[in-house]
Amino acid sequence: MDSIDKLINIFKKFPTVGSRTAGRFVYYLMKLPKERIDELTSAIIELKNKIKLCQLCFNPFEPFDTAQGKGNGLLCPICQNPSRNKNLLCIVEKETDLLSIESTKKYNGLYFILGGTVATMRKEDMSQLRIEELKKRIRGNNFSEIIVALNPTPEGRTTSVLVESTIKEVNPSPAFKITHLAKGIPVGGELEYADEETLESALEGRK
Ligand SMILES: [Zn+2]
């Protein structure tokens, strides 16, 4: 395989990128001066070297400057922010869903990134999700409400059932509040493609 095909095949695996777009990326790169290519490759390497997963919510973050007394290198800025509501937890499928909810600026609680959704309750599927980590997170905290904010896709719904039973297993009190985003996000749609207003009202109307 020549280097053009090799790179096209790499870009094709990116989310939402098909063969044609992958080809455009490669021909665009070919026209760039060497300095820009160096800049790109070192930015990719830096991403891999510097980014860590938050130990509480699994949000990727770059540990901030500890010399200035900020940050402990283990938790992301959201988890370390003292003004966030520590009694409220929002469970999302993936990082981009967290970003979508953050961009509404209407949510002030904490997060937990589940790491995906499953189509079935089979053990091998479920093992891809952070279910054990979720149990640990709920046990170690005093949440008054947990929002299950998974995408309204068939997989998202199956996973919501699983997540809810996990929460109830850890905290069986019927008074414990488990809520879901209000309807409004198109059925089969995904949080990351919902506009801010839709997401904002889905969040505010949760029940
Ligand atoms: Zn975090």
Image: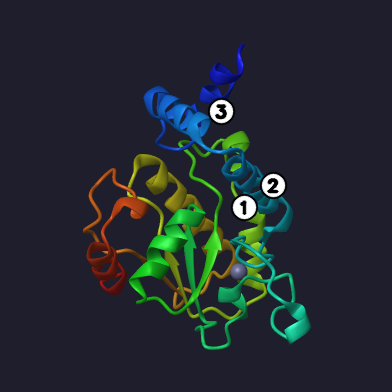
Q: Of circles 3 and 1, which is in front?
A: 3
Give above or below for 174 relative to 153.
below
Q: Mark 3 vs mark 1: which is more N-terminal?
A: 3
Tell me the number on the disc at residue 74.
Answer: none
For the residue labelled by badge 2, is the local secondary structure a helix, a strand or a loop? helix
- Where's residue 157, x and y in %? 38, 47
Q: Quick check: marks 3 and 2 in contact, CB under 8 Å?
A: no
Spatial separation of the CA atoms under disc 3 and disc 1: 27 Å
Q: Is mark 1 within 8 Å of ligand 1?
A: no
Location of residue 5 with respect to 158 vertically, above or below: above
CA gap, disc 3 and disc 2: 16 Å
How many labels sit on residues? 3
Between 64 and 176, the one nearer to me in the picture: 64
Chain-order first, disc 3 or disc 2: 3
Q: Which residue is mark 3?
A: 10
Q: Which mark is residue 130?
A: 1
Q: Which mark is residue 45?
A: 2
Q: Which quadrant of the figure contains the N terminus?
A: top right
Q: What kind of colouring is applied to the model shown?
A: rainbow
Q: Of all residues shown, which one is farthest toward the top?
A: 1
